[in-house]
Structures are given as structure tokens and as C-alpha cells.
Image (cartoon, rainbow, N blue to C red):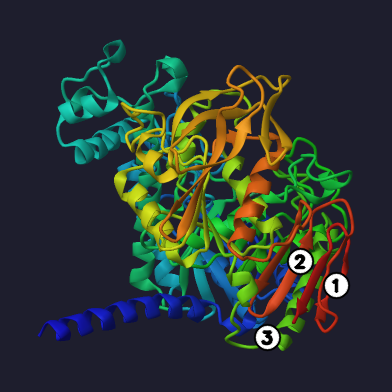
Amino acid sequence: MKKYVLLIIIAFMFSVFNLKAQSIDQFFPEEELITTGMYYYPEHWDEKQWERDIKRIADMGYEFVHLAEFAWFKMEPVEGNFDFAWLDNVVALCTENNLKIVMCTPSATTPAWMRINYPETFRMDGNYIRGENGTRGLNSLTNPKYREFAKIIVTKLAERYGQNANVIGWQIDNEPPALEDYSPSSQKAFRIWLKNKYNTIDALNTTWGTAFWSQRFNSFDELIIPNTSLVGWWGNNPHALLDFKRYLADTQAEFLDFQAEILREHILDNQFITTNYTAKCTGSDPGRTEKLDFATYTAYPNYGSDNIGEIGFRLGDSKVILFASEYYKSVGGATGVMEMQPGPVNWGGYNPLLLPGTVRMWLYHSFAAGGKLACSYRFRQINYSSEQYHSGIMEPDGVTPSPGGEDYMQFMKEINELRNHYKPDQEMPDELANKSTAILWNLENYWTIDRQKLTYQWDTWNYPIEFLEIAKSLGAPTEVISEETDFSKYKFLIAPAYDLVDSALTGKWKDYVSNGGHLILTCRTATKNRDARIWEGNWAAPISELIGATVEAKDMLSNNKNGDVVMKNSHYNWNNWAELLNPDTDTEVLAVHNNQFYKGKAAVVQNKIGKGTVTYIGVSTDNLKLEKDILKDIYSASGASIMDYPQGVYVYWRDGFYIAVNYSSDTYSMNIPESADIVVGEREVKPAGVLVWTE
Ligand code: GAL
């Protein structure tokens, strides 16, 4: 009997996993590698130009068109009066031109009548000022009236296009931001959220530590959203603010799921449902949604920053796609870029011309990391309104491809060539699999550290991403994962500045290491419990046994002072953050402090547990030089072969293809076997260059 039950459970699990795997392939056949599309806003242009534009999109090689994202005003020009005839025409034009469609729900921009007649549908900022219509994402997600209107428009769209076989999928909303909302409907929703979480006001008072500065509440009715705009950051409560962030992220996720549920009722099974998060998304937490098939991201790597070397400012920030292309796979196991910057934008600190080929390199980067779709914001550069000066794939004349448009055409032509070289069921070579690396990520750590940075030098967002970059420079296949993931899939697990922990997580870390995993923890890890409360113990008490040391204290210097750490006779500078470690007798000390009054104290330690190792890097050095050398040693000691790619040169493997991109200002000579078959590019990978080969 028991055996029978077990078999059913196994069969069920298998079918669930299979279903998921199948569904991604069902949306994106593997042999097509990636599908490329284009944002087109018919509502911005004279109707007489639609046919010309859509034909042009098809002729250039695009495979789908992204429609209707901000067009609520045109679908419901007057409350309750709907007009889809114009969209029907555009959909028909796409079909005639063999273009598939990604249809969008327009909830991010509501029509003027809604603001006039129902001002409560807008969020309130920290000064209790209502949003206005005229831009994206300012509605109050908890407002019942807004929900009612959103439900109607999404239902209408789903009923109209959900059975159209030419529609391949749906994008919900636009760059869902989980913005702070202090409106009455949000206040009410926050109270309900808290009541569900804490049940009693006493439990909340204890967790929030409301004994401090007379913050105590007598009942949930007394609660208002903690407001840094009015109280000032020093007067705010970190536990309350963490809960506010969680509530906002839950609310955003629930709003996406709310729309997804409506869509699913009406649309074909093989139409996907997704949304497009910003690459750097500090508010929304994609893992909180339950009804999306996968998540996509928007990528604008060139926003006016110096980047790598002399011409790096033309190439863009290499970390944007590096991170987003891994992070967003955590929903549904696949991702793609929904908006790829087409050229200079209008909102960067300054907006330089891109080095020719840069957009193509970004596209390849996103593809290399496993991207299933690539799409650009937007086809035509607009001649009017807020995004004047923002490039498009077409110049302002509407008919001449911009340099970004040329890059796209080349990319799409080359992808067709790669499709011809595609061989199914390719397994990742052992040499790569042996250094598989995961970065453990939880947005809650960002929320809690970023508002208590303690030093102006701490870059909360990029600190974990720097470790992703180091692993990439060693040639490791990398992923960004959450705590629910099975850690045993990875040889190396890096949890940078992982502030909030509980015993379930530390236990999982210990099991991972005991079974042979190599865990790398860094400073600022395990300083608090999940309620953001500091331990009544040493600074990282719950991981002391794991790392074989206690954390005695933490130090910070100004950026004109010099901290010195020594490892194997090499000196490393730091002034950002350092910890003073007290190792247990069996713990190996890898690096020690070499100046300041605590000279001789341990800065980095390594502990062996079972078949694996735990390394605790208690210092953040300039340019993460020490961190990189430590990782090199850990990888080598475990038998993994390591590379030493320069900064901004990334090499990936997917579906049997090796793909290299170069964000640096120097040509990189790629060392590939003589027998390798080069499919795209050349061994000498120039800045903004790409090389694709098979072995
Ligand atoms: C994105 C947004 C687009 C467009 C673009 C301009 O963040 O999703 O709608 O405004 O920026 O760069």
C-alpha cells in the first residue's frame, strides 16, 4: 500500500516537473534558440503608416510585435465605451506579415477620465500627495475602483485576443515597481497584511520593538504606514520598514497574479504570461508571484557611466545583463529581455553614441545567458512628447534603420545561421559543470542593509553582483538562486552579505557543505534574524559554528584611509568594511589584518565540515582583489580548471554554443582549440565584439 502511494507521489512530481519543463519549450521551441521582436505603438502614429511600418518590421527579420502596452486611452476612450477596432486592424496586419504578437495589458497608464472622476485610483507619496496621470505606474494597486477597471479592461482584451493563435503571449503591466503607496486604500491593506502576519498587536509590538521612542500601538486600528518622508530616516523603525517593503512586494505580486488569473481563464494554453521587470529592480520581488509562466527584464546598460577602460562609456555597464539574465530565471526557469536599449536614451546622466556593434553585443549577451526572447523598446523614434531624443530602431524619419536597427538586423540574420548549427540535447561539458556556481540572492537583504549601510562606501546592490562577476571571470557557469533552490546542484555557493538568516537556512548551508559543497560567505552575513533583530550574541552568532569563528567587531574607514590585509605575503587594501574574526583552533586563517590597532587579527577564515568547505571573507577589499584570489584558490583546490578572463569579457555555453562578448576597451584574443568551429566573429574579440564557436 505504502509503495503504491509513493509511486503515485513520484508519478505526480514527475508530471509536475515535466509540465513546467514542457511549458517553456511549448512557448519557445528549443531549436529556435531565441525569438526576436519589436515594440510598436500604433496609437502614436498616423493610421496610414501602420501597414508600411509593420511590413518593415517583418522585412527586417523580426518575428513578433509587442502591442498595446500603454493604450488604455484608446481601448476605453470614455468610461465603459470600448474600441478595439483599431487594434484588430493592427493584429490583422501583423498576421498578414507573418508576425506573431505579444499582447500587453495596459494597466500601467490609465486614461485621463479615471484621474478626473476617480482620483482615489492613484497612489499617494510620502507627503500624501496623489499621483496624476501622464506617466507610468502611479496607480494605487490596492484601490478597489482601480482593480475594478483593471479587471474589466484585462477581461475585454483576453476575450478578444486570447483565442487568436497568432498571439504567442501576454505581458502584464509595465516594469512593475512596487512603489510606496501611502493612500487610504494602501493604509487599510497594510493593516490587513499585518493582522494576517502577526495576529495580535502584542506580537507586532514585540517584533517591531515599539518600546523605543514611544511607538507602541494599542490596536491594529492605530497603525499607519511608517513614513520616512515625514519622520526622517533616523526616526523610523527598521522592522516596520522591512515589513512595509514586504507588503509592497506582496501587493505588486498579487496584482500581477490577479491579472494573470483573469488572462488564464480566457487565453489559449500555449500563450505565455509574463511581465517585464527593470534589470535593477529594488522594489518588486519576482519570486513572490505564483501565476506567471516566467519573468522578463528590461535592459538599458548605457545610462552615462564610465564602465571599463577608455571607451567603456560607449559600451555600457556590463553588470546589467550579467545579473538580470540570471536573476529573472528564478521565475519559471527561463527568461528573456523584453526591452533592449536601441541606442542612446534621453534620461542618462549623459547620452553618448554607442560604439557600433554595442546593441548586437548586448543581444548576444542576453542570448548567451539563455535568453528565450529579445525585444526592443521601440521601433520608431518618437518625434514628440516625453521621450523625444530617445533612440528607436528607426531614425525620426520612420524609415531609416538607426545603428541599433542595423545591429538588430545582423543579430537576427546570425541567429538564423546558429539555428542551422543547432544540435538537440547538448550536455554542458564537464569542465564547465565542475565549476557551476550559484549566487544566493534575497531582496530582503538589500532592503535591510541598504537603509542601514553604515558607510557611504557600501554599494548594496552591486556587492553580490561583483561576486557573480568574479565567478564569470574564472569561466564558471553561474546562476542567481533563491533559498528554495536545491543547493546540491552547484559546486560553489556564494552568499554575499546575506544579512537575514534563520535556522532553516543555516541548517541547509551546513548540509550543503557536509555533502561536499563549497560555501563562500562574506562580511555582513547573518547579522540579524528575519525580523531584522540583532542577536544577543556575537555579530554572526548563528553561523559561528559553520564558519569556525566568531565575529568580534566591524570596522569602516573613510576612502582616503588605508586598511591593509595580508594573504600569502600579498597585501590588499581596503577602506570600505572589515571584520575582526576570532577563529576556533581547527579553523584555518587565510588572511590577517596588517595595520590598524588590531593588526594580527584574522580577516578571512576557512572551515572544513564533512566533505566540503566554508570560507568566510570578513573584509571588502578595493576592487575585490582579495576576494577574487580567494575564489581562485577555492576553485583550484577543488580540482576545477579556472580561466582568468579580463573584466567585461564574459564567456557562456548554451545549447552546444560557446559565446563570448567583450565590454572592455581592449581587444581580447580568445584562446580556443584549433579544431573549434567559429560560427560568428573572430578569435580576436574587439570591444563590443562577439565570438560564437562550437567544439
Ligand atoms: C523603460 C520603460 C519604457 C520606456 C523606456 C525608455 O523603463 O519601460 O516604457 O519608457 O524605459 O528608456
Residue 422, disc: 3
Badge 2: residue crowd in 10 Å (few <14, some 14–19, many ≥20): many
Of the two numbered discs 3 and 1 on the same chain, state the one appearing first in sequence: 3
Say which of 644 and 328 sits in front. 644
Label 1 with label 2: CB-CB less than 8 Å: yes
The percent position of residue 419, horizontal first and vertical second, equals 70, 84
The residue carrying mark 2 is 660
Disc 2, SS: strand
Quarter of the figure that contains the C terminus: bottom right
Alpha carbons under labels 2 and 3: distance apart: 17 Å
Residue 272 percent across, percent down from the top left: 47, 71
Q: Disc 1 marks which amino acid?
A: Gly
In three-dimensional space, the C-alpha distance between marks 1 and 2, rounded to whole angstroms, equals: 10 Å
Q: Amino acid at mark 3?
A: Tyr
Query: Which is nearer the eye, 174 or 553?
Result: 553
| Residue 650 makes an appearance in the image | yes
- How crowded pointer 1 is (Cα within 10 Å; few <14, some 14-19, many 20+) is rated as some
677 left or right of 30? right
* Residue drawn where x is 66% and y is 51% of the image: 470
- 7 left or right of 240 in image: left
Lateral position of residue 44 relative to residue 492, left or right: right
Q: Residue at x 19, y 28 (%)?
A: 220
